[in-house]
Image: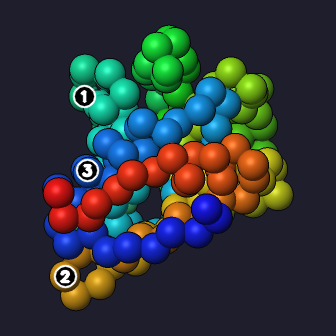
Amino acid sequence: MQHYKTSLVDEAATQALGKSLAHCLQVGIVINLHGDLGAGKTALTRAILHAAGHQGTVKSPTYTLAEPYEILVQGQVTKLMHFDLYRMRSPDEFIEAGFRDEMNEQTICIIEWPEKADGILPLPDLEIHFAIIDVGREVELRALSEKGKVCLSQLHFAPNL
Ligand SMILES: Nc1ncnc2c1ncn2[C@@H]1O[C@H](COP(=O)(O)OP(=O)(O)O)[C@@H](O)[C@H]1O
Ligand SMILES: [Mg+2]
C-alpha cells in the first residue's frame, strides 16, 4: 500500500493511529509530519512513543529542536529522534547541530516541520499530512520508499476503535 487516507474524529482516534503505527515501525524509518500548528503532529508522536514502550512524558522539542528516546521495535531497543524544526531559522542549523548524523540506518526519525530544513533532509519513507476539519482531523499517509510501503501494508487501523 502506498497511500492511506482517513478521518480522525477526536484525539482518541489520533492516539489510536499512533498506536497502530507503533506496531509497524522499522529500524531506521524516517517519518515526516506535515500540518498546521495544533493539527496533531505531537499528539501522534506521543502516542507512537507510548505504544512503543516509552513511559515518560513527551513534550514537543520546540526549543531544543530534537529529543532522543529509546523504544522497542520488534523486541529490539531502538533509538528514536523526535524533531520539531518549527523554530529553526535556516536549514544550516540542522547541519550545524549534527542532526544529519542522527539520521542513520539505526535510528528512527519523526520530524515535525520538515519544511524548515528543505533541501537538507533526505526523502522520508513515510509522509503524514494532517488537515484540521470541522470535526477532528483528516490524515493522509503516503509511502515514499519500500520501507514506507512495508510499514503502510502492515498498518491495521480502525478509526473508531
Ligand atoms: N483527531 C483530533 N480531533 C480533534 N482534536 C485533536 C485530534 N487529534 C489531536 N487533537 C488535539 O489537537 C491538538 C494537537 O496539538 P499538537 O499535537 O501539539 O499539534 P501539532 O504538534 O501539530 O502542533 C491537541 O490539543 C489535541 O488534543
Ligand atoms: Mg508539535
Camera-side residue of 102 and 141: 141
Pointer 1: what residue?
57
Q: Earlier in the sequence, mark 1 or mark 2?
A: 1
Q: In the picture provided, is 111 more to the left or to the right than 98?
A: left
Q: Nearer the viewer, residue 105 or 75?
A: 75
Disc 1 and disc 3 in contact, CB within 8 angstroms: no
Q: Residue at (68%, 21%) from the top-left corner?
A: 106
The three-letter code of the residue at mark 3 reads Gln
Residue at 29 percent of width and 84 percent of height: 133
Residue 126 in percent (x, y) is at: 62, 54
Task: State the image quarter where residue 135 is shown.
Answer: bottom left
- In the rendered image, which quarter contains the C terminus? bottom left
Q: Which residue is mark 2?
A: 135
How many marks on residues? 3
Q: Is residue 76 left or right of residue 21?
A: right
Please state the horizontal and vertical placement of residue 127, each as a whole percent of the image. Answer: 60, 60
**Colour setup of the view:** rainbow
Residue drawn at 30 percent across, 32 percent down: 51
Q: x, y percentage for residue 118? A: 75, 60
Neighbours of disc 2 within 10 Å: few (<14), some (14-19), many (20+): few
Q: Quadrant of residue 3?
A: bottom right
Q: Is residue 45 visible?
A: no
Cβ at disc 3 under 8 Å from ligand 1: yes
Query: Disc 3 on helix, strand or loop?
Result: helix
Real-space CA distance between mark 1 and mark 3, rounded to the nearest whole angstrom? 15 Å
**Element type at mark 1:** loop
* Left or right position of 122 against 157: right
